């Protein structure tokens, strides 16, 4: 990482001796920057709008501060509906700080939007507000005939600069007005005191945002009386006026930030000696001591010319080590871009017309691009939408929604810079918990970064002394394509074996044998997992059930309706009529298999008895469950299973007011041990009702007994690995290849009508000093007359690029 860019400047304003806590603060911030770097993600999608049955293609870029992240190796994505139910979850390996994947949208989807969430393993240790999240528009054929936009419910929020209004101190107050869906609302109004006296008038300046100056007096209770664009009048109180405190004001200028700090005239003594710091990407870049013993106000200048472009946070601490005022400003040194050449060598919007592009990077640095080519009329035009530049420099650093974020990078005018400062004043930002940092406390890392996939093996049911220090595990991975890989998994300690740095896709069968004590697998339960975090079963339901469709979107709605109708017209009738046969359950056979498993696995008090028995070997849906508790949810009357909080959180269980006892291979375990047992390793589960007398203590809350598979339990055998035990491992989500038709060739496939809205998608376009020029060829579909090309990427120095071009007659 380019840490040389962060030069710490120490300034003394009305000099007084340095406090020891300030030195501790410096040290702790350095520890955070070195050991707890924060990652952020940008995702390039092939387009903005989708139809049911289409594929969502995406490419992710992972950064730490201004640089591509060298840390994370596993990338998690989730696609959920408007109720927060996760429809599908995928995991991808990260190569050179990027990864790619896809989701197939169900043809039967009846929703106007989906929600996409993405994060790395490392990001799960910190605030989930900084996960990548995006609402994806889905065209619904009923939208333009039955859908009526709900009435707007305008609201306004007020943000005193620095955080507080303080008696006798002039303060800049910013405001932001939007509707219930986050869409900006133009407003105007007046500020009144408690007696109704008008103090000033205000109106929004840009996207519902504006600001005004006010000097509150003692006892003031300020109220804004305002009207939205429809003339509806409302009253909103401003934040409470405090009698003591400090006010921070800041102005971002040419390669510097000017600031002032003022305290209340009747302020407490802890406000007479203050410390102000500025940091960017967790690196301390400025610190000053402020003596306000004789004066009520002081100020200074923070040089920013050597800083990278991005969000700078300024915080003021009082003498009690408490943060009392905070402000974020945007530093724009215009050093973040590089400019590849995207040339259109041959163009055609005719039916199946041939198009040729050339991408050329003038310098010798390695670059990593993604390229999408789409039907511009169906996809809509949203020039201010988030892209790689606005996401990694702005929205990835802020909490809350920023409307049309790329607008703030569209030109160099003072007015645009002023509008961006309104964004800074009206959006939350807090990467640090100052209270913990000042006390020297470090973040708790529950999910350490992973080196791709692992094979983690736990041996349960034997004493550790039975495992020799020289013991190891021979593992043969057998993939679906019949290829194999031989691994030696070393003994780590105690009952654990493991190896990391593996990459494999889909599911693989692991055939294994201990080297020293080859009978060990018969004496113990051996469990495998790949180290991937389990994630949540639900995400927070979307607040924006209406996607903000406007009259301007009508052309895109009509275009998608036309495409949907065309797809239905050309679709073969045989494909439209799917005959679903009613499933037939052969109860006798299931019972017989369960009895065989009971005889094979159980003993003593666990054998037979009145219990629910689940045969997971013959249950095709079992392997899709994240853990055994999810598998059991809703299957046993009276058994209440509540999922844990966060990734890997242990669940809570109750049955008739008591807690069930848990057993793995008839050895008592706790929830976390059972949760870490992969469902693919489980052969059978027996659930005994409360009071059954099974287990230690009589099973007052019932008993859940889980049995892992033994040799020969897999439904499919493989003669090549005869005599070896086996386990099923789940790897990375399978990669789907984007289909590119070649209409210069004669093929039966080319005789079908072509209604694709994504004409070309290439997630990895790579250049270097020996390969500066890339040629791309694609063909139009049968109906498109306006084509959009989007090229995004990053070079090895972390500079960004976003290029858009249109092909039309």
Image (tube, rainbow, N blue to C red):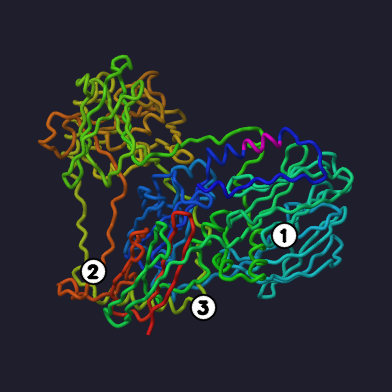
Mark 3: secondary structure: helix
The x, y position of residue 52, in whole percent, is: 35, 66
Q: Name the spot of residue 444 as percent of width and height, x first.
A: 53, 34
Q: At x 37% / y 59%, what residue is drawn?
A: 769
Between 92 and 221, which is closer to the camera in this rendering? 92
The image's mark for residue 374 is none
Count of residue discs: 3
Marks 1 and 3, Cα distance to the nearest angstrom? 38 Å
The image quadrant that residue 557 belongs to is: bottom left
Q: From the viewer's perspective, is residue 722 above or below residue 309? A: above
Q: Which residue is mark 3?
A: 551
Count neighbours of disc 3 (C-alpha within 10 A) and say few if under 14, some if 14 to 19, many if 20 or more: few
Residue 698 within the magenta-colored segment of the rendering = no
Q: Residues within 10 Å of mark 2 (few under 14, many from 20)?
A: few
**Magenta highlight: main SS:** helix
Label 2: state its secondary structure. Answer: helix
Residue 756 in percent (x, y) is at 30, 72
Q: Between marks 2 and 3, how big is the CA–CA gap?
A: 33 Å
């Amino acid at each position: 990482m380019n840490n040389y860019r962060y030069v710490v400047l120490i300034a003394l304003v009305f000099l007084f001796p340095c406090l020891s806590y300030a030195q501790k603060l410096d040290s702790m911030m350095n520890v955070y920057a070195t050991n707890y770097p924060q990652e952020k993600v940008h995702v390039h999608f092939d387009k903005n709008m989708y139809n049911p049955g289409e594929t969502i293609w995406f490419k992710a870029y992972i950064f730490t501060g201004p640089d591509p992240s060298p840390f994370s190796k596993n990338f998690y994505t989730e696609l959920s509906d408007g109720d927060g139910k996760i429809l599908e979850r995928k995991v991808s390996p990260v190569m050179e700080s990027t990864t790619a994947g896809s989701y197939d949208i169900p043809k039967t989807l009846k929703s106007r939007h989906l929600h996409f969430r993405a994060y790395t393993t490392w990001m799960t240790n910190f605030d989930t507000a900084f996960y990548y999240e995006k609402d994806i528009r889905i065209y619904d054929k009923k939208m333009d005939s039955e859908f009526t936009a709900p009435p707007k419910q305008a609201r306004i929020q007020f943000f005193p600069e620095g955080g507080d209004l303080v008696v006798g101190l002039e303060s800049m107050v910013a405001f932001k007005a939007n509707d219930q869906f986050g869409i900006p609302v133009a407003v105007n109004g007046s500020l009144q005191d408690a007696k109704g006296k008008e103090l000033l008038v205000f109106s929004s300046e840009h996207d519902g945002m504006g600001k005004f100056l006010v000097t509150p007096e003692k006892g003031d209770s300020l109220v804004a009386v305002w009207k939205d664009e429809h003339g509806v009048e409302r009253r909103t109180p401003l934040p409470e006026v405090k009698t003591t405190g400090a006010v921070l004001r800041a102005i971002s200028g040419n390669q510097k930030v000017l600031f002032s700090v003022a305290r209340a005239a009747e302020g407490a003594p802890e406000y007479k000696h203050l410390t102000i710091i500025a940091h960017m990407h967790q690196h301390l870049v400025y610190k000053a001591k402020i003596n306000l013993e004789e004066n009520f106000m002081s100020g200074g200048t923070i040089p920013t010319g050597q800083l990278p472009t991005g969000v700078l946070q300024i915080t003021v601490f009082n003498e009690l080590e408490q943060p009392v005022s905070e402000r974020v400003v945007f530093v724009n040194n215009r050093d973040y871009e590089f400019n590849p050449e995207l040339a259109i060598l041959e163009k055609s919007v005719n039916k199946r017309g041939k198009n040729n592009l050339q991408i050329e990077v003038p310098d010798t640095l390695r670059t990593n691009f993604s390229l999408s080519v789409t039907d511009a009329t169906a996809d809509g035009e949203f020039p201010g939408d988030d892209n790689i530049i606005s996401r990694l420099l702005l929205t990835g650093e802020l909490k809350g929604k920023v409307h049309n974020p790329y607008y703030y990078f569209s030109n160099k005018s003072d007015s645009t810079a002023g509008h961006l400062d309104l964004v800074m004043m009206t959006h939350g930002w807090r990467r640090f918990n100052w209270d913990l940092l000042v006390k020297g406390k470090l973040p708790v890392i529950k999910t350490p970064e992973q080196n791709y996939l692992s094979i983690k093996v736990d041996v349960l049911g034997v004493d550790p002394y039975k495992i020799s220090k020289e013991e190891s595990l021979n593992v043969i991975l057998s993939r679906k394509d019949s290829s194999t890989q031989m691994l030696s998994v070393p003994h780590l300690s105690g009952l654990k074996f493991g190896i990391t740095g593996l990459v494999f896709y889909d599911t693989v069968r692991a055939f294994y044998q201990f080297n020293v004590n080859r009978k060990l697998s018969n004496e113990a339960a051996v469990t495998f997992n790949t180290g991937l975090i389990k994630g949540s079963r639900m995400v927070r339901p979307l607040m924006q059930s209406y996607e903000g469709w406007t009259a301007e979107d009508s052309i895109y709605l009509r275009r998608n309706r036309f495409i949907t109708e065309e797809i239905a017209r050309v679709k073969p009738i045989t494909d439209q009529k799917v005959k679903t046969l009613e499933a037939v359950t052969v109860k006798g056979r299931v019972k017989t298999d369960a009895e065989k498993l009971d005889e094979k696995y159980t003993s003593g008090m666990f054998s037979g008895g009145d219990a629910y028995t689940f045969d997971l070997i013959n249950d095709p849906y079992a392997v899709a469950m994240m853990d055994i508790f999810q598998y059991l949810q809703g299957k046993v009357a009276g058994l209440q299973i509540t999922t844990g909080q966060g990734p890997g959180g242990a669940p809570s269980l109750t049955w008739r007011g008591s807690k069930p006892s848990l057993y793995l291979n008839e050895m008592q375990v706790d929830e976390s041990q059972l949760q870490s047992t992969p469902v693919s390793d489980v052969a059978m589960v027996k659930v005994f009702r409360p009071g059954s007398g099974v287990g230690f203590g009589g099973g007052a809350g019932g008993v859940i007994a889980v049995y892992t598979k033994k040799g020969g339990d897999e439904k499919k055998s493989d003669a090549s690995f005869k005599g070896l035990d086996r386990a099923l491992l789940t790897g990375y989500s399978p990669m789907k290849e984007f289909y590119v038709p070649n209409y210069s060739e004669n093929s039966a496939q080319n005789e079908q009508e072509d209604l694709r809205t994504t004409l070309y998608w290439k997630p990895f376009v790579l250049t270097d000093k020996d390969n500066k020029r890339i040629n791309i060829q694609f063909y139009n579909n049968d109906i498109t007359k306006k084509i959009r090309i989007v090229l995004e990427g990053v070079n090895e120095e972390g500079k960004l690029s976003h290029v858009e071009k249109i092909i039309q007659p």
